[in-house]
Amino acid sequence: MELFLPHGPLGGRVASIASKSQLQRLLLCAALADRETVVHGASDAADVQAMCRCLRALGARVTADGKTLRVQPVTEQAHGAADCGESGATLRFLLPVAAALGRETTFRLHGRLPQRPLGPLWEALEAHGVRLSRPAPGELLCAGRLESGHFLLPGDVSSQFFSGLLFALPLLSGPSELRAATPPESAGYIAMTLAALRRFGIAAEPLPDGWAVPGGQRYRSPGAVRAEGDWSNAAFWLAAGALSRPVTVTGLQAESGQGDRVILEDLRRFGAEVEQNADAVTVRPAPLHGCSLDVRSTPDLAPPLALLAACAAGTTRITGAARLRYKESDRLASIAAALRALGADVRDLPDGLEIAGGRLTGGTVDACGDHRIAMLAAIASARCDVRLRGAECVEKSDPHFWQTLAGLRSGTEESR
Ligand SMILES: O=C(O)C1=C[C@@H](OP(=O)(O)O)[C@@H](O)[C@H](O)C1
Ligand SMILES: C=C(OP(=O)(O)O)C(=O)O
């Protein structure tokens, strides 16, 4: 789908969507629990749907009732292949879990997912009793049963390898140790996994370079859980507030476990005016200036931050971003291409980008199948004309994105 987004102001109120990352974790824990769990804060994001679909394939019952999901835990009866869509988290979380349950499972992978890194997790699983193969393009077969023991993974490829094993290892009969050979990046996402596990009564003891995970644990349902508002998604709307007219995003918890809540600090570093209440944030435009940002812990913030950089006076360096090459697109290349297409001056760094801010002149952006690139381009329309190719990919995390944008364009309140 190609969209023309004429240059025009963005401002108003947005109700946050339920956190995709948190929902995926809560749904998975619920599927492994001892009784039914009600998950408040449903989402029709394709990645959340992918998690629901795969949990059903593993034998869980997941039913939607308005904004609530009911999850009945996995039974012995599995239901065919697990279609992960393009969701890296779904594949990398469920692969070790299926292996821990001893369920022979065919995973289906779409879009760029078959090309995204899996090697370190693959090797770690194969060293512990699991047999993995690729029977056909876009398919991955997992057989055998995961054995407890010592797991060592690089920290700079994907935190999702650690999260997946942290979900799986408590299910094994013996104890395990999971260690990082290099400091784990995207650490906030591992913290989110540990927080979800704690809510379901699962323990993992910290070690200097990893975690000790006792075996024989049982996931205990707290009965009902609620997903927080999504800070990664809100970052785009908040960036619009810094670039155009005041934007308020409601339903964002200040004390959130999501690492991407640091978008507020980043916005302040650019010079934007930020006001935070109990569960709403307002960002107002102000003269923006370049700064240095390390996105090692918050890779999904790089697209909105790069857009802010392109509109700020002076130069911004975004570093710690090498891992962005492994996302739905080579996200370092696609951010640079998008901004250059809109008239920005962008230099490639080995682990990031250097962006000389100025006036965006407008142009045609290819979303490269990457929801966060489409969103970057959409918010850039606050500063210039944008033609966007491949706009439909926003569905991965926010199928209502274009409707919300339309609300901000007309300055009306968006209610979801
Ligand atoms: O665990 C998660 O939910 C995620 C972890 C991060 O990936 P990496 O750890 O692969 O960087 C992040 O980019 C992704 O959007 C979601
Ligand atoms: C990279 C992302 O998700 P995943 O790795 O789960 O596909 C994302 O949402 O930007």
Image: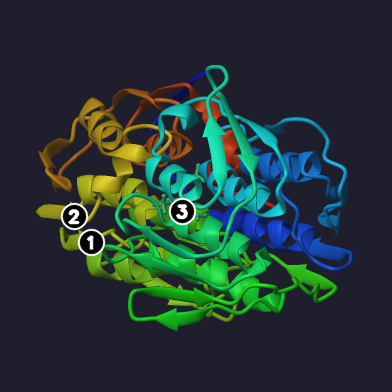
Q: Residue at x 35, y 39 (%)?
A: 326
Task: Report the side of 343 relative to 76 (left or right).
Answer: left
Between discs 2 and 1, the one toward the N terminus: 1
Task: Report the side of 315 relative to 416 (left or right).
Answer: left
Q: Residues within 10 Å of mark 1 (few under 14, many from 20)?
A: some
> Residue 151: which quarter of the image?
bottom left
* Cβ at disc 2 under 8 Å from ligand 1: no
The amino acid sitting under disc 3 is Phe
**Disc 2 on helix, strand or loop?**
strand
> Residue 283: which quarter of the image?
bottom left
* Front residue of this view, candidates 58 and 200: 58
Q: CA distance from mark 2 to mark 1?
A: 5 Å
**Disc 3 on helix, strand or loop?**
helix
**Picture coordinates of residue 338 (x, y %)?**
29, 31
Between discs 2 and 3, the one toward the N terminus: 3
**Disc 1 on helix, strand or loop?**
strand
- Residue that mark 2 sits on: 319
* Front residue of this view, candidates 255 and 117: 117
- Residue that mark 1 sits on: 294
Cβ–Cβ below 8 Å for labels 2 and 1? yes
The numbered disc on residue 306 is: none
- Residue that mark 3 sits on: 161
Q: Residue at x 19, y 40 (%)?
A: 359
Cβ–Cβ below 8 Å for labels 1 and 3? no
Q: CA distance from mark 1 to mark 3?
A: 22 Å
Q: CA distance from mark 2 to mark 3?
A: 22 Å
Between discs 1 and 3, the one toward the N terminus: 3
**Picture coordinates of residue 42 (x, y %)?**
75, 53
**Picture coordinates of residue 124 (x, y %)?**
44, 51
The amino acid sitting under disc 1 is Asp
The amino acid sitting under disc 2 is Thr
